[in-house]
Image: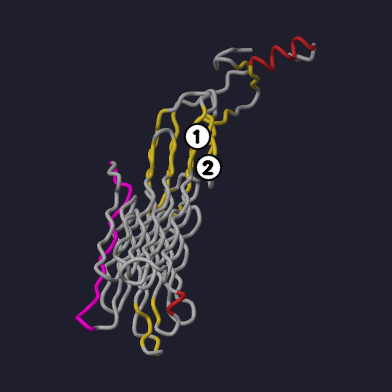
Amino acid sequence: MANSNGGIVGIDNPANYSTVVTTFNSSGTFTAPPATTSVDYLIVAGGGGGGSTSGGGGGAGGFRTATGSPVTAGSSYPITVGAGGAGGQHYIPSGPNGGYAAGNKGSDSTFNSITSGGGGGGGGGDPLGSDKDGGSGGGAGNISGVAGTGNTPSVSPSQGNNGGSANQGPAGYPFYGSGGGGGAGAVGGDGTPTVGANGGAGRTSSISGSSVTYAGGGGAGTFVAWNSTPGFGVSGTGGAGGGGNAGTGGTWDVGDNGTANTGGGGGGGSYAATQPSYANGGIGGSGVVIISDPTGLFSASGIWDMNALYDNVKAGTWSN
C-alpha cells in the first residue's frame, strides 16, 4: 500500500474532489470542511417593495458573486438571507398626498463580511419615500418622484443599477406612468404619461449547477382607468429574475410580489378610479446565498482515511 495522499491510505489513486453546493433560502451557518480554504459564492439581497397608487417598481436586491473567496478550514460562518421589503399601502393617513406610500427597502444578505444591499423601495404618490436607494434603486413615484440610486453602498463590481424616472405628462393630464425598479443587469425603464415602465433585467448565475436569473426589478404602475373606463394606461412588467409585475387595473390593482429567493423587486400598485383602495405595491422577493465548495467532497476507489485504518486494525477487521 502507498501513503501518498496525506492522511489517507490505499492504492495510489489521484485525488477526485466533487463540488458541493449549499443553498441558503433562509439564514443559517456555513461550516467550511477541513480541506476547504476557498469557496465561490452568490449573495443576493431582498428586493424592495413596490410603491402604491401608480407607484414605482421596487429595486432588486444587490447581486454579488465571486470565485476563490478565502475561508478558514473548519470554521463556521453565519449566513443572513435578507427579506423582501413591504409594498407601499394605499390610503395610509399620512403625507401630503393622502398617504400613497412608497415601498420599503429590502434587507441585506451577508456572508463572511460580504454584504449585498437590499433593493430600494419604489416611489408612491407620496413623494416622501426615503428608502429608494439600495442594491438596485427603486423606480420613481408618480408625483415629484425621484428615482433611487443603485449600487448603494458602492462596491466593485457593481451590485445593481438605478431605478427609472416617472412622467406625469402635461398639466391637467389625468394619467401618469412611474419608473421601473432597477435590476442587477439593467436600469429600470422610464415611465411615459400613459405607461408604467418595465423593471430592469437581472443577472444569471450557474453556481447552483443550472443557469438561473436573479435580481430583476419590479414593474411600475400607472393610471389604468378613468371615469370607470379601463384601458387608458399600461402597467409595467417585472424584469427577468423575479421582478413583480405592476397592478393591471380592474378590481385588483395590487402589484405582484417579487419571486421568493431571487431578490426580485415588488411591482408597483396601479390606480383605477373604480377601485382605488386596492392599489398597494407588491412585496419584494427574499434573497438567497449560495456557497460552492470545489474541494468539498473527496472520492476515489480503494482508499481509507487514517482513522478508519486505526479502528479496523485495533478491532482485528483490517484485511490486506
Name the residue tied to disc 2: 27
Q: In the rendered view, would you say 156 is above or below 49? A: above
Choose top left, top right, bottom left or bottom right for residue 31: top right
Q: Which residue is mark 1?
A: 78
Tally of numbered discs: 2
Image disc number at residue 52: none
Residue 18, percent from left and from top = 54, 34
> Is there a contact, CB below 8 Å, between mark 1 and mark 2?
yes
The residue lying at 29 percent from left, 80 percent from top is 175
Question: What residue span does the magenta drawing correspond to?
Answer: 156-172
Residue drawn where x is 43% and y is 73% of the image:
279
Measured Cα–Cα span from mark 1 to mark 2: 8 Å
Task: Tell me which label, 1 or 2, sits earlier in the chain.
Answer: 2
Q: Residues within 10 Å of mark 2 (few under 14, many from 20)?
A: some
> Looking at numbered disc 1 in the image, what kind of residue is underneath it?
Pro
For this view, does 185 lie left or right of residue 47?
Answer: left
Tell me where residue 238 sits by quadrant: bottom left
Left or right, 2 with reference to 195: right
Q: Nearer the viewer, residue 140 or 246?
A: 140
Relative horizontal placement of residue 64, taking residue 4 as reference (left or right): left
Magenta region includes residue 165: yes
Q: Is residue 80 above or below residue 225?
A: above
Q: What kind of element bears circle 1?
A: strand
Q: Residue at x 43, y 49 (%)?
A: 107
Question: What's the coloring here?
Answer: secondary structure
Q: Position of residue 218 (x, y in %)?
A: 39, 63
